[in-house]
Amino acid sequence: MQVPYLSYRKMHEDVRSKIVQAFSEFFDDAWYVSGPRVEAFEKKFAAYTGVQCAAGLSNGLDALRLALQSLHIGKGDEVIVPSNTYIATVLAVSYAGATPVFVEPDSSTYNIDPDKISEAITKNTKAIVPVHLYGQACSMESICAAAEKNNLYVIEDNAQAHGATFHNKMTGSFGIINATSFYPGKNLGALGEAGAVTTDNKELCETVKILRNYGSAKKYYNDVQGYNMRMDECQASFVSIKLDHLENWTAERRKIAREYDESLHKTGDLILPYTAEGATHVYHVYMIRTKYRDALQKYLEENGVGTMIHYPVPVHLQKAYHDLNFKTGDFPIAEEIAETCLSLPMWPGLSAEEMQYVCNTIKKFFAAIVNR
Ligand SMILES: *Cc1c(COP(=O)(O)O)cnc(C)c1O
């Protein structure tokens, strides 16, 4: 049996006819960028997230960049980021000219550890960027309390957690302005590049809308040096259609996660995902940990099962961040996660048979280790 890590084809079967219809309308209307579809999606996504305003953008990295810029975060400022995240979170801080300050994750949720945030705050700290990694909401009450006490902004990176909540409040609605991505592989994905910011602050939202469009509120009148970070009309209609299915797809991801939990419980040295009190998990990624990670990944691959590693090298040890002068051992929790983590196939449409095959293959691997 072949079980891919992710199958867009199967995932998209549910929406095929609506997407094709939307494309046909988009084609006939012949208006391609920044139009009524983007506006309609922004309203719908803001309502879904429970905020006043959303601005559709080119991608998630640009959303993070414009969120930081709208708050005038720049040179001389420090921004707290998790040591365990995708590099985009950190790149956005670097692009702003600010300095990323890494904080270790909680070793059971893998999200930024709120208890370690205070130690990282200096007189230059301007913001905290919590990332709801793998789909689990961060402990937003502790994070927001630390921010408030120290007069810092919170900017959520919600690229991986569409639909997750902390104490029943949606991720993407806690920070002053928050960023998300609709990269195809995300829980809510476009069929190409797209992203957005979400905020209750209409002024910040307007600032982002101006920045994304060459710094212009009125065509050919440019108030600031902006960018081209606009969203495509067709992507807006595709994500809008997919948003209607998100709750069902999330339920399906959770069902698959429960089945993995039950089936893999007490298998070898596996550490399974843990969801913290108050948080919900939307399983963008179902990540397990084992000291046999590399051998297990190879064995699964040989048996037709696709897996991924999120992420093999922590940001502080990436060549791209050589200039920050970090070394192995500086963020040991993030480093240990990088060495032991493995993400199993997880997508709406993954069948029970496929999932059982993945679990059985993993059990065979561990049985072989024990018998060796
Ligand atoms: C995907 C991702 C991003 C960047 O989104 P793009 O649309 O690919 O630019 C940022 N942060 C996290 C945590 C992500 O997973």
Image (cartoon, grey):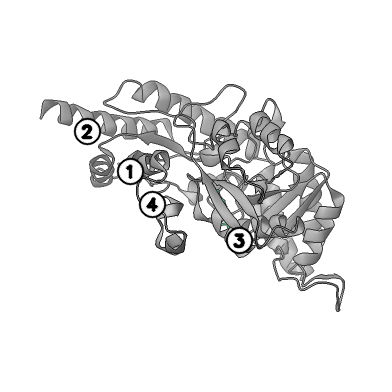
Q: Which residue is the extreme one toward the front? A: 123
Q: Amino acid at mark 3?
A: Glu
* Structural distance between the alpha carbons of marks 4 and 1: 8 Å
- Pinpoint residue 172: horizontal percent, then vertical percent: 69, 42
Q: What residue is drawn where x is 30% and y is 34%? A: 290
Give the structural element (helix, strand or loop) at label 1. Answer: helix
Compared with 181, 163 (above or below) is: above
Q: Answer left or right for 294 relative to 248.
A: left
Q: Quarter of the image for the N terminus: give it.
A: top left
Q: Answer left or right for 272 relative to 91.
A: left
Q: What residue is drawn where x is 81% and y is 54%? A: 205
Residue density around tag 4, few if under 14, some if 14–19, many if 20 or more, within 10 Å? some
- Pinpoint residue 273: horizontal percent, then vertical percent: 45, 29
Q: Amino acid at mark 4?
A: Val
The residue that label 1 is drawn on is 339
The residue that label 3 is drawn on is 193
- Pinpoint residue 3: horizontal percent, then vertical percent: 36, 43
